Image (cartoon, helix red, strand yellow):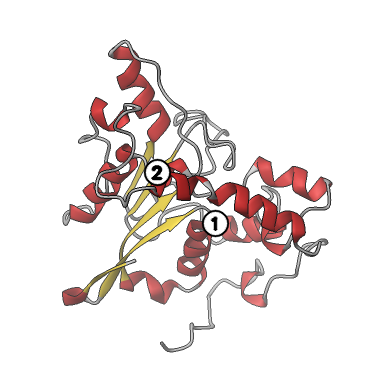
């Protein structure tokens, strides 16, 4: 999270379910939106993920996993109150080959089919960038094989960081685009973002195995899905509660 002190606004950079939580807060606590200049969502699952279904079948779940199943009450409430659209300028960075957030490979322009990590434009701007498709095209044109862009590698890919810093530097639309991403950013030799500490790739690559091991040891809970608070009910046309003061 970065701070833009002069305007008393913040820029939020989120990953995975952190983006879903951020979207929930800005959907149901609309007074927070004026405090956020931009949201950069990496590997988000705004519409849930098919991958969350098997853990429920095999009794390896918690409340959070159940809420990320695509047909959960949690996600239905988010969509009902406009949470599938951006509330602030939002740059969504995803990958067709992200095996944690699925579906992620449809792209845009398919009626009724949407990637989990993409947001609709809404009243604010949105930039949806598929790092795998972006880099695969550049690599194939150059006669090179594309590489897989995974859920965790989105955090350290040079191409991802180009989009992130493009968004942070953009003081007009506050959005990041793929325009400045080069073949060098996409190549295997250059896919690690510059200025990251040595060993970052190895440490970040441990994230998903650690999370999987942690999840397998957690007590099974959260099914049936936990009840949502009253403010998410369909008849609540106007949101009343407020976040506690900081």
For the residue pair 92 and 210, the one nearer the viewer reads as 210
User: So how many labels did they put on this image?
Assistant: 2
- Mark 1–mark 2 Cα distance, whole angstroms, equals 13 Å
Is label 2 in a helix, a strand or a loop? strand
Can residue 66 be seen here? The reply is yes
Picture quarter with the C terminus: bottom left
Of the numbered discs 1 and 2, the one sitting upstream in the chain is: 1
- Tell me which residue sits at (38%, 34%) in the image: 131
* Residue 50 position in % (x across, y down): 67, 41
Can residue 43 be seen here? The reply is no
Q: Name the residue under label 2.
A: 93
Is label 1 in a helix, a strand or a loop? helix
- Tell me which residue sits at (66%, 50%) in the image: 212
Q: In this view, does 189 lie to the left or right of 180?
A: right
Q: In this view, does 207 lie above or below 181?
A: below
Q: Name the residue under label 1.
A: 17
């Amino acid at each position: 999270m970065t701070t833009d002190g002069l305007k008393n606004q913040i820029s939020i950079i989120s990953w995975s379910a952190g983006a879903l939580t951020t979207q929930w807060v800005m959907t149901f606590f609309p007074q927070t939106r004026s405090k956020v200049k931009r949201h950069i969502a990496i590997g988000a699952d705004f519409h849930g993920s098919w991958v969350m279904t098997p853990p429920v079948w095999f009794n390896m779940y918690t409340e959070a996993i159940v809420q990320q199943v695509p047909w959960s009450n949690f996600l239905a409430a988010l969509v009902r109150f406009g949470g599938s659209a951006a509330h602030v300028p939002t740059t969504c960075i995803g990958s067709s080959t992200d095996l944690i957030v699925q579906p992620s490979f449809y792209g845009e322009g398919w009626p009724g089919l949407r990637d989990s990590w993409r947001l609709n434009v809404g009243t604010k701007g949105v930039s949806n960038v598929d790092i795998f498709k972006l880099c695969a095209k550049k690599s194939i044109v150059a006669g090179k094989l594309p590489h897989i862009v995974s859920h965790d590698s989105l955090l350290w890919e040079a191409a991802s960081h180009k989009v992130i810093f493009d968004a942070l530097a953009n003081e007009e639309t506050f959005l990041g685009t793929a325009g400045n991403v080069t073949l060098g950013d996409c190549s295997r030799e250059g896919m690690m973002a510059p200025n990251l500490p040595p060993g970052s790739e190895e440490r970040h690559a441990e994230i998903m195995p650690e999370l999987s091991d942690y999840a397998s040891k957690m007590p099974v809970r959260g099914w049936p899905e936990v009840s949502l608070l009253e403010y998410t009910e369909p008849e609540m046309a106007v949101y009343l509660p407020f976040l506690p003061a900081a």
